[in-house]
Image: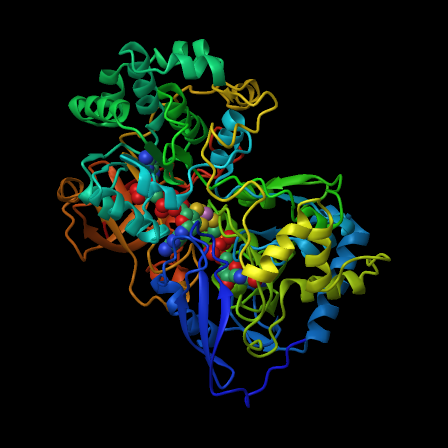
Amino acid sequence: MFAYSASMAPMEERSSSCPLDCPDLCGLTVTIDQGRVVEINGDRRGPITDGFVCGKVRKFADHMYGDDRIKTPLIRDGAKGSGQFRTATWDEALAIVATRLQLIRSTSGAEAILPYHYGGSNGWLTEGALATRFFRRLGASNLDRTFCAAATTAACRGLYGVMQGVALEDYEHARLIVLWGINPTATGIHLVPVIERAIAAGAKLVVVDPRKTPLARRADLHLPIRPGTDVPVALAVIHALFTRGHANRAFLAEHAAEVEELERRSARWSLEDAAREAGLELAELDRFVELYAQASPAVIRVGNGLERNRNGGSAVAAVLAIPAVAGKFGVRGGGYTMAGDARWGVSDQAGIAEPPSAARTINMSQISTALQTLTEPRLECLFVYNCNPAVTAPDQRALIEELRRDDLFVVVHDQVMTDTAHLADVVLPATTFLEHRDLRRGDGATRMFDSHAVVAPVGEARSNNQLFGALLERFDLVRPGDAMTDEEIVASVFAASPDGPALRAQLATATIASPPEGARQIPFVEVFPGTPDQKIHLVPEHLDREAPAGLYTYQPDPRTDEFPLTLISPSLATQISSMFGQLRTAPAALELSAHDAAARGIRTGDAIKVWNSYGEVHCLAKIATEVRDGVCVLPKGLWRKHTANGFTSNALIPPGLADLGGQAAFNDARVQVAKR
Ligand SMILES: Nc1nc2c(c(=O)[nH]1)N[C@H]1C(S)=C(S)[C@@H](COP(=O)(O)OP(=O)(O)OC[C@H]3O[C@@H](n4cnc5c(=O)[nH]c(N)nc54)[C@H](O)[C@@H]3O)O[C@H]1N2
Ligand SMILES: Nc1nc2c(c(=O)[nH]1)N[C@H]1C(S)=C(S)[C@@H](COP(=O)(O)OP(=O)(O)OC[C@H]3O[C@@H](n4cnc5c(=O)[nH]c(N)nc54)[C@H](O)[C@@H]3O)O[C@H]1N2
Ligand SMILES: [Mo]
């Protein structure tokens, strides 16, 4: 193993890669001085990083070495949530955790324990591996991970199976780029220069978003859609494509199933009705149909904004059906991209090396309800890692009340003292991505890095695999032949599949690997749907059964006179979900339109309250020209310290789900706003 010491060459550059939940998957060059990270830059191994990196990762050293970094295990020694902890050794902390887990297991059964984790770092060593093996062997409740892209994935898999979408670097070839519910300027900045080059070469840009995002300002057409109304809009576009002779009947006959059924269902929505429901100008929607029908290659980038409401799964499915109906595939830069579904031929399951257990499964997006209502057994332990649910899960007020429960044992493994860690009984210090190894794949990127630690951990931080490896041992759950070290797990992942050795060899020589089929396949030329019959299923039966009112059925806007405004919570450029929120000093401000503010006598800088039946948030107001009437914005990932009463947008988000995938409905809150 590499030995670290302060006597290393004073300045040294080492290669790494970014593990954050983002489609760009950047290779990084990290400058190290005296054993500490002093600079981070993007490299050129990946296709779109182009030597630069986003502001949040450039400043990652502030996260690593800041005051909020957890350096030792901590044991609560005040009331729950008081923030009073004493330091402990790893041995003592692990003994406390193991004793309590054993007690719960023997008195109530292991299902009273729930591991709670999401995408803090995307990689096969930190996301699954020994943690998942441990909880499966323990017999703990399973977690259905539905915060993000659950509806999108269900829709995409239903229509196309696992099929690689258009590679982001191929957007340069497009003549029309449609950004649908996505804001790359904040959430994946490396796509922006690619779009700019395409525009310079004559491509048109359309943005479908309730907000006038930076790219919406530059767009040829911005459709400021009312949140949650993408189903009528996409179906009306499909209907118009069919009725105006823009459908590619030959392509559909060869490659698609359930064409007539989609045609029939889309007939429910005329452009007029859809425009009215979505709050759009009819002429603009009409223009979109014609722009789209005429352009080739045309690509639709499907974001996460549209999936997070009661209609979200049907919305994504309808949007993904558009390129099929118009026959936009078969050329480089034509089709759609969602989180790129690469067929790797290897999977993280080999590293977990334990099949899913028969224990019950709990939807993470309904954790407040699960904690309140589940019995047989009641939840007695939440073991949190890679996640900060106190500010990222729905129904925050109820959740925080439950986390404060004296009979709920809360363990948090994290890098910094998050809002969830403040509510814990035991806090364990985690390594950052520059302090541990991982197989990094970003958010569905068609590339992979195997990056090693580049510096020694701060304090006594341990990686997820070190923590859960120690627990496997304490619980006597290690079996002969188990891969336990990172090196052994990586080896077992690649050994488990025929494609593995070639990928490993690629990583060893080029330090970046692509799936066996290549990283930028042309859909319907080089790659076909991963459905059993290799056809697009426009109305897949299983999705039709899953969606409560059937696929493509629009559930109308639930706004009332009492709660007339739709609250959405898109990403901040300076954070990734709640990560880096500790570094933010600015107080939270709710953005609303000049019209909605004036109607309430609100001006920028006013102290206001935003409320509904789930909770109330006290913050500042900001009149924003980006926001359409009827919509207000309080970004995701704010911490409790950023508002006056310690609640964020998540306190207003209902625990109800989208129509597919068990997806959280983060953009489905209806609220009222007033001056305080
Ligand atoms: N800087 C930064 N980068 C990130 C993240 C971050 O927090 N910060 N998060 C990462 C993660 S976890 C994810 S999932 C991705 C998310 O990245 P994006 O897909 O860009 O998702 P959001 O930022 O949630 O929202 C995108 C847009 O959807 C719009 N929107 C909201 N509701 C609707 C609707 O009903 N219909 C339509 N058409 N649009 C709607 C919002 O106004 C917003 O501009 O970004 C990743 N990258
Ligand atoms: N209001 C609102 N809320 C939302 C959303 C929204 O649109 N609106 N969107 C949702 C989305 S898209 C997502 S993806 C979720 C994300 O929600 P979370 O999964 O809670 O993600 P983060 O807020 O990024 O928190 C990840 C935590 O993991 C820690 N971490 C990072 N790497 C490691 C590691 O290697 N080991 C350990 N043990 N910990 C690590 C980080 O320090 C951080 O505290 O939030 C959801 N919440
Ligand atoms: Mo996400």
- Using the rendered image of the protein, determine whether residue 380 is visible from the camera's viewpoint: no
Q: Is residue 646 left or right of residue 34?
A: left
Q: Nearer the viewer, residue 275 or 485?
A: 485
Q: Residue at x 75, y 43 (%)?
A: 355
* Outermost residue, bottom side: 7
Q: Is residue 642 left or right of residue 528?
A: left
Q: How is the image coloured?
A: rainbow
Is residue 433 positioned above or below 600 on the image?
Answer: below
| Quarter in which the N terminus is drawn | bottom right
Q: Residue at x 34, y 66 (%)?
A: 584
Measured from the top left, where is residue 346 in percent x and y? Answer: 65, 46
The quadrant holding residue 123 is bottom right
Is residue 318 positioned above or below 514 on the image?
Answer: above
Measured from the top left, where is residue 412 in percent x and y? Answer: 59, 62
- Using the rendered image of the protein, determine whether residue 139 is visible from the camera's viewpoint: yes
Q: Is residue 213 left or right of residue 416?
A: left
